[in-house]
Amino acid sequence: MFSRPSRSAPAKRHLTRTLAFRLTAAYSMAGLLLVVVATAILYMVLQAELDRSTALFLADKLHVLRTMLRERPSDKDGLHEEIQLENAARRYQRFYIRLVDEHGAPIMTTPGMADQLDIAELVRLTRNHPEASFAMAGKNGQPFRVASAAALVGAEPPQTDTIQIAIDVSQEVELLSRYRLWFWAILLTTSVLFPLAGYRIARHGIRPVEQIAATARRITSTNLREWIEAEGYPSELATLAGTFNDMLDRLQESFERISRFSADIAHDLRTPVNNIRGETEVALARARTVDEYRDVLESSLEEAVRLSELIGDLLFLARAESPLTELRLEKVNIGELLTTVRDYYEATAADAGITLTAVQGAEDVTADLDRSLMLRAVSNLVSNAIAHTPRGGSVTLAVFIAGPEARIKVCDTGEGIPDEALPRVFDRFFRVDPSRSQTSGGTGLGLAIVQSIMTLHGGSAEISSQLGRGTVVALRIHTAAK
Ligand SMILES: Nc1ncnc2c1ncn2[C@@H]1O[C@H](COP(=O)(O)OP(=O)(O)O)[C@@H](O)[C@H]1O
Ligand SMILES: [Mg+2]
């Protein structure tokens, strides 16, 4: 009937389109990005800190020397100590100081400075960078940081010397290069570890989904009892599994109903056919009188009528369920409709010793209805009421307005329906007492038809009953303009 696109998963899934792959890729990207950003920031901070401590060291040294030159210009021992001895005591972070006078002639120099640095180059660069520090390469290739500053010597008359300091920063440079090495090592390791860990996590996370899919694949109409064990699933997937299980339950239920329904149909069709067949066989066994043949034919006709009614009812229900069913709506005076039904059943009720009345309300109640269908619904109710009400009882039809809807009520003072059967009376083929209805000709489809007629009208049917006291069936119809 309906063609729909194939919904089964493609047999061969491309790796890059699997959820596990995508999750893994996402984890790894995020993880690596985090590592790169974090280490890069740490690297920059480290570099800045090293530069700062070098700069502080240089500034500090310059300050000490300037103070000494200004305050105690004659303290040659102090200067000697600062410039020539202190450096020798150091093993790392060696530094070299050169003190020159106004004409550039050296006054004092840290021993060995000329071995490490090209002094002419140093002088030229300090002239280019007055009052600032700059980088310079030593003679053996080590990196240096250099700063220079003018210093007043003495007070009267003042004279200006120049201090030049160069500090060996190879320790710092080496530290940074080791850091960079570590950075690549970490990046390499994590770029292997992240995908591995990510893939494991992703596989673990989607395992329940695969189990649900596997269960779904196993499901056929015969094993709808399959069940997904959602124990230990994360809550989102537990919900999915729960929904799935509920769906299976509903499917199971409707399959059971359908198979029960077809068994019922088969049974109900077989009975009249068997009757016709049996009687005909017996009649044909020997020669019969015309009257005997007539009896058999009459009985066969009865069964045939029963059969065609049953088939008609089934067809009606099948059609009513089709979404294409259309109602022939017209303005119907419900009071008049009830009177019509009353008139139709008057004789039957009188035969059964039952009073049948249609209560006329003060005002007319009209609604848009399919007249013939509503007649059929009300007739089914009245025939039930008469069938289940003993002699001397009464059956009453009434209509009234309740808010936006009209309500038709069929009340009887009959035997009533037991509470446990009440919820099932609208089911197809359901009879409270199957043996009795079999003889009285009921098929168990009457109320099912009433309900589907009401559903077609957008209304509903409700039943209430008290055992031994009577039954009330109410049909609710919207009267508000549709
Ligand atoms: N007014 C009523 N009083 C008592 N029992 C009723 C009444 N209407 C329906 N029932 C019960 O509900 C069952 C289903 O009704 P229905 O669908 O009309 O089937 P049927 O009349 O063919 O048996 C009946 O078999 C009967 O047992
Ligand atoms: Mg009935």
Image (cartoon, grey):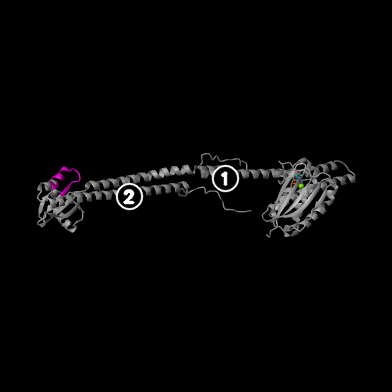
Magenta extent: 82-96
Estimate how packed mark 2 is, as few (under 14), some (14 to 19) or many (20 or more) residues with alpha carbons within 10 Å.
few
- Left or right of 476? Residue 23 is left
Q: Is residue 85 magenta?
A: yes
Which quarter of the figure is the C terminus placed in?
A: bottom right
Can you tell me which quadrant of the image ligand 1 is in?
top right
Q: Is residue 50 visible?
A: yes
- Left or right of 66? Residue 472 is right
The local secondary structure at tag 1 comes to: helix
Residue at x 42%, y 47% (from the top left corner): 27
Residue 104 image point, x, y percent? 11, 56
Estimate how packed mark 1 is, as few (under 14), some (14 to 19) or many (20 or more) residues with alpha carbons within 10 Å.
few
Residue at x 76%, y 46% (from the top left corner): 471
The kind of residue on which mark 2 rests is Ile
Q: Quadrant of residue 88?
A: top left
Residue 48 image point, x, y percent? 27, 50
How far separated are the C-alphas under marks 2 and 1?
Answer: 48 Å
Residue 243 numbered tag: 1
The residue to which callout 2 is attached is 41
- Left or right of 89? Residue 385 is right
Mark closer to the observer (2, 1): 2
